[in-house]
């Protein structure tokens, strides 16, 4: 598996492109293993009120170094010794409430007080250091006591949850994409995680330790992990000149192909922390014979990409046309042989799936872009725009396309051994209770799916077993904000774009983990929006009654490339 990657590792010079969401940290040139002592912790200010003490405690909770040393300074001695907080970090916006309730709920002792904390819950950092969006609002009461010796308020019963604010979290944590591989593919898969930003000198060490723990809970079972059996023999060491030595053990029996994939994982995952070179070792010896130190330039690009000459398509009067010039595509789908409602082109460009009007119902056809499309034994009141699985290793073309059936079920039309396309069912029981599904897009690496369910953006992992395919670990992104989503697509493996019915944010860009979002410009884009498509290195294209509109960046004014775009609808890029 992944032989194409392995064969090129020693000779390729193209550096894989990793989008950054935070700035790289500069690591120390000092020899020796870095420590995690963390920055010096300042003592609490004097004469804080009970409310101020709680607020300072919540701010300090973003500093997890030394078992929350900074937070424990706001606890009384007994609580400081005994506090064993949960591993999750709950994140609120900065505008939360911390107030002393009415006197009737306060202790009779004037040296005791209760502060009530309330606020929306943006999400939490899980034990796997991955962001988990949403959750129930924060509401907790914290008891304080004025200390006899210095008369300062200190917390006597801290909550089990570690609660902090979004600005404090951003100031103290560093986001890094860890990398794994898509099964049966040569495509890397990003797994966004958060690690403590301080101390900077040991940031690469923390990244390596997290990588060796494996994929996040949400992505587990959906990716392959060449480093699965690897553990650290001793601590990684930051050496002069930006060299990180990673001493592994447990991999001596792995073959050369697997070892090269391990190196790829390490180097790609360390790219954003400014490590110049990585020296992986296996039981004290060079991990890959004949190659000691590795840089990013030693690897080919393993992103999920499509050919530059695939410019996308759109609909015009039930026919498929080129997105670039509105000319009909070759073959029956472009001549009007089918009454096309929506369509999808495979990532390799060779195959087409179209949803057509079949009497009063909807049907689906699959086949070559320029040839006759076979009718599939699948009829429904409604079928969503299809979405293709990428080709697997050893195959030049995709063999599977998905669609949502009547807002409740997901069908995958797969090419069987007899070379016939047949509809099968995807297990979507994990989405029970999420509401009607009105859009579905597979990521271009095939490991995730994004769904519009009950007008919300839901991301789930795609897990394949010997006899089934299922969606696992669904998570609603920005659940309290994005409640009016019309359509969604993958801008890249890390980013999504969503079209909404909101006049204040008709199009938004959001990361795959849902930590934050960015609005696109409002200029020229009128509601209602009816669809959206996106792809790496292509402009985002949105559809409204006035045709198709493009923008390459969130700050750009929406524009029509030509007058012909005013008559087009339902745009789509391959995937």
Image (cartoon, grey):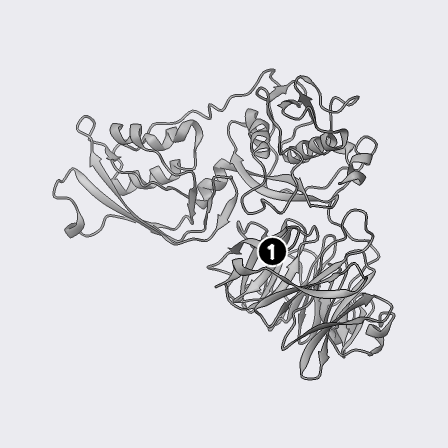
Q: Which quarter of the rendering shows the C terminus?
A: bottom right
Question: Crowding near pointer 1: few (<14 within 10 Å), some, many (20+)?
Answer: some
* Residue 204 higher or lower than 193, as above or below: above
**Label 1 element class:** strand
- Answer whether residue 241 is visible to the viewer in this image: yes
Q: Nearer the viewer, residue 297 or 264?
A: 264
Residue appearing at x 44%, y 29% in the figure: 65
Q: Position of residue 50 (x, y in %)?
A: 25, 40
Total residue callouts = 1
Which residue is painted at 69% across and 45% down in the image? 183
Q: Is residue 130 left or right of residue 361?
A: left
Examine the rendered structure and indicate whether residue 553 appears above or below residue 338. Answer: above
Q: Which of the pair 428/444 is nearer the observer?
A: 428
In the image, farthest residue toward the left: 108
Query: Where is residue 85, by image quadrant?
Result: top left
With 85 as the anchor, is 541 left or right in this view? right
**Which residue appears at 57% of the width and 27% of the height?**
205
Quarter-wise, where is residue 470 in the image?
bottom right
- Residue 197: give x, y in percent of width and height: 52, 33
**Residue 196 x/y as whole percent:** 50, 33
Residue pushed farthest bottom?
A: 359
Side (left or right) of 180 relative to 124: right
Location of residue 18 (image quadrant)? top right
Q: Position of residue 408 (x, y in %)?
A: 56, 68
The residue wearing badge 1 is 470
Q: Quadrant of the N terminus?
A: top right
Q: Is residue 445 above or below residue 454?
A: above
Q: Is residue 520 visible?
A: no
């Amino acid at each position: 598996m992944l032989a194409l990657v392995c064969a090129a590792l020693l000779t390729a010079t193209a550096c894989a492109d990793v989008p950054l969401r935070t700035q790289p940290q500069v690591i120390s040139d000092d020899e020796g293993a870095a420590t995690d002592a963390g920055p010096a912790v300042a003592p609490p200010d004097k004469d804080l009120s009970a409310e101020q003490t709680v607020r300072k405690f919540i701010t300090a909770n973003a500093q997890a170094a030394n078992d929350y040393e900074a937070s424990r300074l706001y606890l009384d001695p007994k609580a400081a010794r005994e506090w064993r907080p949960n591993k999750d970090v709950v994140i609120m916006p900065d505008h939360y409430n911390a107030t002393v309730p009415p006197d009737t709920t306060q202790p009779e002792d004037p040296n005791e007080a209760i502060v009530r904390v309330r606020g929306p819950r943006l999400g939490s950092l899980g034990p796997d250091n991955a962001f988990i969006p949403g959750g129930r609002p924060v509401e907790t009461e914290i008891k304080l006591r004025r200390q006899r010796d210095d008369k300062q308020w200190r917390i006597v019963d801290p909550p089990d949850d570690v609660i902090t604010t979004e600005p404090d979290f951003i100031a103290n944590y560093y986001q890094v994409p860890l990398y794994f591989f898509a099964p049966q593919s040569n495509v890397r898969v990003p797994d966004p995680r958060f690690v403590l930003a301080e101390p900077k000198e040991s940031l690469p060490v923390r990244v390596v330790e997290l990588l060796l723990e494996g994929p996040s809970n949400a992505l587990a079972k959906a990716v392959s992990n060449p480093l699965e059996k690897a553990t650290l023999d001793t601590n990684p060491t930051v050496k002069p000149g930006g060299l990180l030595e990673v001493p592994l053990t447990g991999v001596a029996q792995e073959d050369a192909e697997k070892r090269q994939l391990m190196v790829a994982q390490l180097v790609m995952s360390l790219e954003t922390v400014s490590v110049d070179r990585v020296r992986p070792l296996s039981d004290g010896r060079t991990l890959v014979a004949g190659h000691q130190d590795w840089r990013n330039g030693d690897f080919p690009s393993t992103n999920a990409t499509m050919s530059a000459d695939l410019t996308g398509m759109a609909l015009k009067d039930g026919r498929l046309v080129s997105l670039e010039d509105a000319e009909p595509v070759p073959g029956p789908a472009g001549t009007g042989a089918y009454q096309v409602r929506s369509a999808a082109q495979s990532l390799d460009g060779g195959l087409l799936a179209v949803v057509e009007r079949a009497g009063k119902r909807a049907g689906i056809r699959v086949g070559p872009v320029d040839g006759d499309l076979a009718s599939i034994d699948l009829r429904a009141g409604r079928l969503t725009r299809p979405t293709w699985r990428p080709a697997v290793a050893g195959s030049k073309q995709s063999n599977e396309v998905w669609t949502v059936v009547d807002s409740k079920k997901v069908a995958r039309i797969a090419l069987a051994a007899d070379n016939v396309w047949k509809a099968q069912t995807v297990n979507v029981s994990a989405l029970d209770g999420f509401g009607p599904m009105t859009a579905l897009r597979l990521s271009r690496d095939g490991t995730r799916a994004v769904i519009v369910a009950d007008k919300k953006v839901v991301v789930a992992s795609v897990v394949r077993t010997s006899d089934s395919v299922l969606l696992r670990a669904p998570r609603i992104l920005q659940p309290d904000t994005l409640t009016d989503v019309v359509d969604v697509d993958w801008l890249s493996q890390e980013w999504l774009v969503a079209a909404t019915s909101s006049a204040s944010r008709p199009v938004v860009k959001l990361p795959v983990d849902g930590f934050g979002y960015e609005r696109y410009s409002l200029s020229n884009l009128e509601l209602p929006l009816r669809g959206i498509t996106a792809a790496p290195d292509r402009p985002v294209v949105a559809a409204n009654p006035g045709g198709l509109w493009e923008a390459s960046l969130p700050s750009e004014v929406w524009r029509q490339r030509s007058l012909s775009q005013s008559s087009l609808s339902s745009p789509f890029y391959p995937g």
